[in-house]
């Protein structure tokens, strides 16, 4: 078997653009076939061409596919570099760690460069520190609608990429806490979480109709109420006239009828 190919291109990191996908470290294939190596080289070259066009999303995908085929350190390095260009420093940091863990055979010069790039990624990771957060299994924390793991440490530390974010904290019986804002590269922001108790819902028994007045009687001064009452009275009068015409009522006055 041919073993892993030694592709040469290594990218530098400069610009930034948004993206969402998460990345996990994968072990390299142990014994790639000649076909795998050829496919990996083609993917690598196509990814390099896209990188020169700054099409970082697609370049990242191709570098990842190349690494999955042949396990070449250069492909993994370029995938991490593309993540830096996409302003996804958390994933880039993890891929640089993956490269160092999976490929101890790289020469010291390359390893030194990788460690420097990894530190640059670390410095760009933003962090939210949630203070005043209760320790409770019923507590739910989401960032950008994604669940955040709670290991019980306080304040709770949440890593994030730079950009616009939405935080939500919920707990049964309490009003939810929402925060929205923009985090800069490397920013550390402390957020005080306030979860006031939610008011108990007002429950009215079916046998107890809602009163038509409030405590101080001001409801009776509302014009909409008098319009509604007038409509009811007018309806009653009209009905009475119709009944009188049919001989079912006897008149007492011009507008009042009784059985």
Image: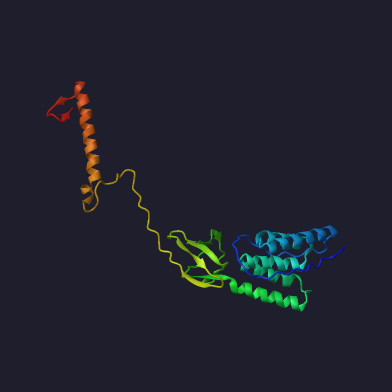
Residue sticking out furthest to the top: 247
At horizontal 72% and vertical 73% (from top left) the residue drawn is 100
Residue sticking out furthest to the right: 1
At horizontal 22% and vertical 32% (from top left) the residue drawn is 236
At horizontal 40% and vertical 59% (from top left) the residue drawn is 198
Q: Is residue 249 left or right of residue 157?
A: left
The scheme the figure's colours follow is: rainbow
Of 105 and 173, nearer the camera is 105
Q: Quadrant of residue 200?
A: bottom left
Q: Is residue 253 above or below residue 35?
A: above
Of 188 and 231, nearer the camera is 188
Q: Is residue 157 left or right of residue 28?
A: left
User: How many numbered marks, from 0 up?
Assistant: 0
Which quadrant is home to the C terminus? top left
Can I make out residue 139 in this image? no
Residue 177, given in percent of the width and then of the height, sits at 45, 62
Which quadrant is home to the N terminus? bottom right
Residue 124, given in percent of the width and then of the height, sits at 59, 72
Residue 102, given in percent of the width and then of the height, sits at 75, 70
Can I make out residue 181 in this image? yes
Q: Is residue 95 left or right of residue 184?
A: right
Q: Quadrant of residue 79?
A: bottom right
Residue 202, given in percent of the width and then of the height, sits at 35, 52
At horizontal 56% and vertical 59% (from top left) the residue drawn is 146
Q: Quadrant of residue 238?
A: top left
Of 20 and 52, nearer the camera is 52
Residue sticking out furthest to the front: 53
């Amino acid at each position: 078997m041919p073993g892993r190919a030694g592709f040469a291109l290594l990218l530098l990191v400069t610009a930034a653009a948004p993206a969402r996908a998460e990345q996990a470290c994968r072990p390299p294939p142990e014994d790639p076939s000649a076909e795998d190596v050829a496919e990996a080289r083609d993917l690598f070259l196509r990814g390099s061409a896209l990188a020169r066009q700054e099409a970082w999303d697609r370049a990242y995908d191709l570098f990842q596919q190349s690494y999955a085929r042949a396990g070449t350190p250069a492909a993994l390095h370029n995938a991490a570099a593309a993540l830096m260009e996409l302003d996804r420093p958390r994933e880039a940091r993890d891929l640089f760690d993956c490269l160092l863990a999976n490929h101890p055979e790289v020469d010291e010069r390359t390893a030194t460069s990788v460690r420097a790039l990894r530190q640059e990624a670390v410095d760009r990771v933003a962090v939210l520190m949630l203070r005043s957060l209760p320790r409770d299994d019923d507590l739910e924390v989401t960032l950008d609608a994604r669940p955040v793991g709670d290991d019980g440490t306080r304040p709770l530390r949440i890593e994030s990429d730079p950009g616009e974010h939405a935080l939500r904290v919920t707990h049964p019986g309490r009003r939810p806490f929402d925060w929205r804002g923009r985090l800069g590269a490397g920013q550390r922001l402390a957020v005080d979480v306030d979860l006031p108790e939610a008011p108990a819902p007002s429950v009215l028994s079916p046998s107890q109709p809602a009163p038509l007045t409030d405590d101080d009687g001001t409801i009776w001064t509302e014009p909409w109420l008098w319009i509604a009452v007038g409509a009811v009275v007018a309806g009653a009068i009209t009905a009475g006239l119709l009944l009188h015409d049919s001989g079912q009522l006897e008149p007492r006055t011009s507008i009042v009828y009784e059985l």
